[in-house]
Image: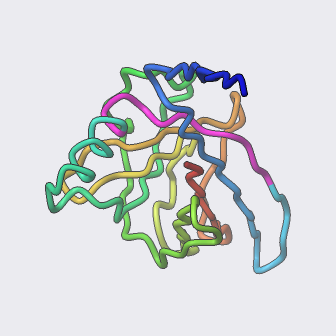
Amino acid sequence: MEQHKQRISLRFNEKAPVKGELRLRIYRKGRLMEVWEDENLVVDAGRSVMAKLIGGQAGLNVNRVAFGTNATDPAPGDTAIQNAFIKPISAVSYPTATQVRFDFTLLESEANGLSIREFGLLCANGTLFARRTRGGKTIDKDSDLAIEGQWTIFF
């Protein structure tokens, strides 16, 4: 009986494809005006945080969302949100075994006067984990406007 050993070759990518998706529901005077969603960039600092979390370092969990004014397209080296209004994440859930979702809200009474062009997920130590812009579209935040968001990270 002849036996053949089959060698399986695996190729590992230096950067695993960790992806995210940001979904926004924008309300004016309590009425839904827009639903918007798109993929986001997990920045290099966010990848570094993941490595440290796997290694057991505490205090690096994602726990805040930032709303900012920079319309420049996200880049891997991004480290901050410009003119940020920052608030805690409302809830964390796990839709599947390989996803984590962060829910947040921006109330009518918050960040009024801010021209929102970017969003960021922040870790407990202030590190920017992920960033997204709206492709040149600005949300001019007024006292009659609220935003509900879900930011899902896929592993």
Q: Where is residue 2 in the image (x, y as percent from the top left)?
A: 71, 22
Q: Magenta includes 39?
A: yes
In-front residue for pair 16/4: 4
Pick the quarter of the image with the N terminus: top right
Colour pattern of the rendering: rainbow
In-front residue for pair 143/55: 55
At a point 58% along the width and 74% down the height, the residue shown is: 108
Determine whether 107 is above or below 49 in the image.
below
> Which region of the structure is painted magenta?
36-46
Q: Residue furthest front?
A: 1
In-front residue for pair 66/16: 16
Q: Position of residue 129 (x, y in %)?
A: 38, 44
Q: Position of residue 68 (x, y in %)?
A: 46, 43
Question: What is the magenta segment's predominant secondary structure?
Answer: strand
Figure disc tally: 0
120 horizontally vs 55: left or right? right
At a point 54% along the width and 34% down the height, the residue shown is: 41
